[in-house]
Image (cartoon, rainbow, N blue to C red):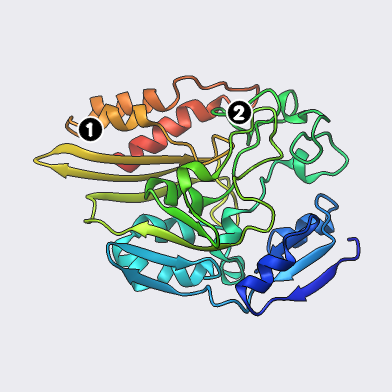
Amino acid sequence: MDDFLYTRADRPETAVRLAAQPGVRFIAGGTDVLNLMKDGVERHEHLIDINALPLSGVREAAGRIELGALCRMSDAAVHPAVRGRLPVLSQALLASASPQVRNMASLGGNLLQRTRCWYFRDASMPCNKRQPGSGCAALRGQNRWHAILGGSDHCIAVHPSDLAVALTALDATVVTHRRRIPIADFYLPPGDTPHLETVLRQGELITGIEVPATLPAEISRYLKLRDRATFEFAVVSVAALVRLRGGVVREARLAFGGVAPRPWQSPEAEQALIGRRLDDASIRAAGEAVVRGAVPREHNAFKVSLIQRALQEVLR
């Protein structure tokens, strides 16, 4: 790891001022950025420790739940407001990483974690996300974990956050010191600039997350399919909220992980459910809509059927 300057910020305005220069990054739990620096994947001249900032609470406001960006994942997962009003979010958090990591990792940091693509994490391999213009080794390499949806000729890495998938289904908003960003607009598609991952600007500080706390849904579930039971990233995942009236679907919110460079939404799958009974035919139609346009590669074609089976499991 290269040498770097380390500063603890005691006020948000101090942190933002210090982080305005290139080569500076915020750090909270450090569960991702420190590993990237140790592996030589990222280099930062200056780390701004923001743990002293007053951004760690969870509170219920009018029609929403507000989560502080520095709230630890483990604390958010067991908070009564989250468990009672947003069970899909609690489930996603508890399915993430390990208890030790959840005790350290912050919500804001989790949203900004980098992909677990092994080509990105290996500084000796070409990767357009790590070094623009160097190529994407995953396109013709070992791509079992990679994207079947939303990728490009420059990158097919998948986004690793379980939290982001659940927040996408919940129609959450990411709050910074400058603005409020719908999570659907927070992550950028890879296109020909996969190194640009979010809409955040240099020095922009995430201060919290706002989640609408509406009426309970009949289905509010996060399902994560992975190679082992803990401390593993999703091969595929599904977050679903479905509200029924008289056995007919009145509202459906679906989001998918492990299959795209950002949390994947499928309005077509949602529309395949709305106005219909939640039965085998409508669930099958939703599954077919999810994978329409999928581009499977040599080693990840199994994800096409797996994501459909995962959706069936959640909805049934």
Q: Which one is in front, 188 or 259?
A: 188
Q: Which of marks 2 and 1 precedes in the sequence?
A: 2
Q: Is residue 85 visible?
A: yes
Q: CA distance from mark 1 to mark 2?
A: 28 Å
Q: Which one is in front, 287 or 129?
A: 129
The residue lying at 23 percent from left, 32 percent from top is 274
In this rendering, position of residue 24 left or right of residue 213: right
Residue 252 sits in quarter: top left
> SS of the residue at dot 2?
loop
- Tell me if residue 91 comes above or below residue 75 in the rendering: above
Report the residue that reaches farthest toward the right: 3
Rendering coords of residue 214 (x, y %): 25, 56
Q: Amino acid at mark 2?
A: Gly
Report the residue that reaches farthest toward the left: 246
Residue 78 sits in quarter: bottom left
Which residue is tagged 2?
Answer: 151
Which residue is tagged 1?
Answer: 274
Q: Quadrant of the C terminus?
A: top left
